[in-house]
Amino acid sequence: MKWLILGPEIYFLAVAAVFLILSMLRPNERRDFSAALFLAGLGVAVTLATIRLEGSLFHGAYRIDLFSQLLKGLLSMGFFLVVCLCSSLKGIHETRQSEFYLLLTTCTLGMMLLVSSLELLTLYVALELASYSLYALVPLRSGGGQPMEAGIKYFLSGIATSALMLFGLASLFAATQTTLISELILKLPALLNTPMAFVGLLLTLCGFFFKLALFPFHIWAPSVYQGAANQVTAFVATATKVTAMAMLIRLVSMSDGNTSLAHVLIALAIMSMTYGNLVALVQKDFKRLLAYSAVAHAGYSLIGILSMNPTGYAAAVFYALAYLAMTFTCFLVVVKVASDGRNIAVTQLAGLHRRSPLLAMALMVGVFSLGGIPPTIGFTGKFLVFNAAMERGYFLLVLIAMINVVVSLYYYIQVVKAAFLLEPDEELPAIHLSSPTTLLTVVMVVIIVVGGIWPSHLFELARSAVQALR
Amino acid sequence: MSMQLASFPYLSTILLSCVAGLLVILFIPRERETLVKWVSLAFSGIALALSIFVFCAYDRTLGGLQFVEKLRWVEPLGIHYFNGADGFSLPLILLTGIVHFTGVLTMWELHGRVKEFFAFAFALVLGVFGFFMSMDLFFLFVWFDVSLFPMYPLIAIWGTTRKEYGALKLFLHVLAGSALILPGIVYLAVASGLHSFDIVALMQPGALSPGQQRFAFLLFYLGFGILAGVWPFHTWSPVGHVAAPTSVSMIHAGVLMKVGAFGILRVAIFLCPIGWEYWAPVMAVLATIGIVYGIFVGLRQTDLKYVVAFSSVSHMGIVGLGLSTVTAEGLNGAVFQMFAHGIMTALLFSSLGYIYDKTHTKLIPDLGGMSRVMPVASGYFIVAALAGMGVPGFASFWAEVTVFISALKVYPVLGILAICALVLSALYMLRVVQKTFYGQRNERYAHLPDVPFSLGLPRMILVAVMVLFGLFPRLMLDLIQTAVIPFMGGLPR
């Protein structure tokens, strides 16, 4: 019975096995999609059923608590949502679709293992499981050079960061003689004024900065967002970001409010926000624009983490959740508008308000949420994060972040303008949404708006989750 | 501040009527344009009726905050859903009700994307109502942004002259203000040590040190000042006014700029009175420059909408001058001027809208002799122009007189400058009226019909309101006084 607390992990391992078998059978697009949708939906149920479980396995190397289970819930939802977008996987060749689902599952599994890992080596192994799945997913898109280039770029920069991270893990071990996070929490704060421990922690964080696409670890993001299939990008942009934010919270909370670390993180946050927003201003491709907006959002979420107080960690968890909802909504629109699986430029959204009023509205809500306009969940997330930073007295940081928010509105409004204002050169057919897709779109819009208006339950949940960190 | 809880949530019902209007419109098929208009009229009518009700039902002998609704929203952060109405907010709630209702009537002839237009308009008005009612800084900010974001589509889709440029300029300028306001409100909540966004709690003397007040006041004054059209942050306003479609110009100049001025009053002045006294001379100088500058630039304009837009800049300067006097009369006049200017500008834009719809031009040289073509439509504009000059008998006369008397006492030089400029403004408004409505008739427009009764209705309502409060100014001044006296009495001296 002790193994029951590993329910989600075992379940997703089983799902991976199912797809491994399916990938050996004759390719069948409809069968794969139905199986994936069913299994993903069940996965959400399984994960949510275990959300209140607690326990510890493998001599404290693996812990199940509200924090890890909440994030597993988010990950399984992210997985389910991305599978929902795969009803017509035009970007990926039919023969490879089972592998696509297989890799998506193993990646989710890796990230689930990651958020429960409380031991540095377990953590590294789980991270690599997730990463290697992604390295294979990115170039899976049919159509030549660009996906390949993105895949190679992602792989090379990824393993380079892994090397840095390993170096950091080794230094941490050398400084503290332990790999268990529960012991690191006790030993590290006192040791952080020694260069070895400090650099060790910082290099360890780099692994997750990379996943979060924080400046200067963002180099892969534009190419991967643009090069990977739309569904894969949706997964990279939502699930992996949530995991990275969660792991940064876990690792930064070990430092126990170290000011030098906070200063480094402040510098990174400011650079990331400013760079991401400024470069996004000139982007033409919608996915590339979202990539740079992700760089900026990495900065915003880091503000909550670097506040290093429980409110800040809770705000960052809330932000991760909000980010999942709003980014997914934007990708939902991308996938539905680009029905042939190609990339779309911002100007290709022209006339969307006539082609599909619902998608246009969803896009507006999603983009305004990214831009932080109330009453959306994105605004509430930013507000919580800024509130936490202000409690630490970082007034200037909040001011700079808000100026960035205003700068970012320029490119977000260009998207809204394209959808509502521009007329396409030639008459484009209306986009017909199937009734499940319509429902999904409406649900996402409702989540974004309702989460923005009534944040108190979600925030309470986030608060109790971060209490499990100690 | 004394508080009376509401027996029935009247204020929330006003907000709810806007939400309901928005939702109902979303579910109407887009071809049924007339239905959308009737539904809009019905829901804006409910909001108007309720705002008239709360205006009349407010107990003036008790004063303080009435119709209070308070719910805990996010407990750990000290956020409350906290609505209330006092002598400062009631005139503006009434103003919003009137301008929205007449705005719907003014847009009765709109064709093309009608559904979206009225849906966005309801979102905008929802934000404005919420802003005037809210007594919690968090919600205040939420409503502030909610009232601003619909401006972009409203202007960019249905606007006219350089609409995309105007819409973008307006949107980025006014939201830049929020980059100062949001850090400001979080700073207040944290720096006061109360960890609460409750305005009444933060108003307690001693909640904020003088240094904090001076700093925070500047943030709010600049942040809200952009929206209030304070010189030199006004540049978005003429461009935006001119680009916007008629009813959006009405709401925008009539109500939204008051959101900015009210923000200065409710947040900056209420919470940072020491900062207010400290920065008052700067406010006075900027306001006077605004008055004079608006009039002189207005003199040179050939586009009627630009004329009205620059007169807005100078009239909002009068509001600013009133606020900067740090006296009871000044505050009283400033709030009355917000109301009076709102009604007057709405009337100016509304009557202009009809003329523009028919002639498709708003250039003064192209028009001429309009009073012979459409005497009634011209009449509305002339009445509004007279009100703008401060002719007795209209609400704006009392408001301007009150402000100038108090300004002369506190800042004699600036006061005299402003009054001289106002005399000039009479000159320039009369010039516009003469060139547009009298003189040689332009034969091109001779065949155009005059405004029919049904379309004239919104303008009649606005004229009636202006005259009502012009003849009985105490209806308004006494109400505002119930809020001004306790507030000024409670200031640390």
Image: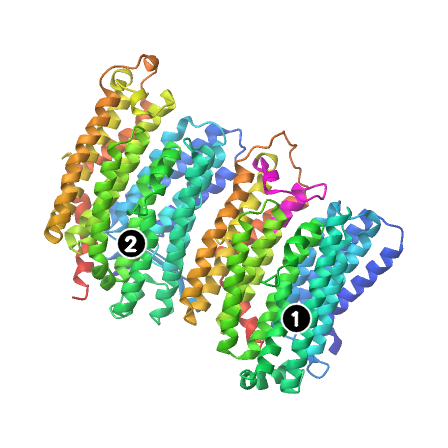
Tag 1, which secondary structure? helix
Residue receiving disc 2: B264
Report the disc number at residue A115.
1
Circles 1 and 2 on the same subunit: no
Over which residues does the magenta segment extend?
Answer: A329-353
Q: Quadrant of residue B105?
A: top left
Q: Position of residue A82 (x, y in %)?
A: 69, 54
B97 up-or-down from A49: above or below: above
CA separation, marks 1 and 2?
Answer: 47 Å
Label 1 is found on which chain of the structure? A
Q: Position of residue B156 (x, y in %)?
A: 46, 36
Tell me if label 1 and label 2 are in contact, CB under 8 Å: no
Asked if residue A379 is among those painted magenta in the image, a careful observer would answer no
Asked if residue A335 is among those painted magenta in the image, a careful observer would answer yes
Q: Position of residue B246 (x, y in %)?
A: 37, 32
Report the disc number at residue B322.
none
**What amino acid is at disc 1?**
Val
Residue at image coords 30%, 57%: B267
Residue at image coords 64%, 44%: A438
A121 up-or-down from B106: above or below: below
Q: Position of residue A188 (x, y in %)?
A: 58, 83
Residue at image coords 35%, 39%: B251
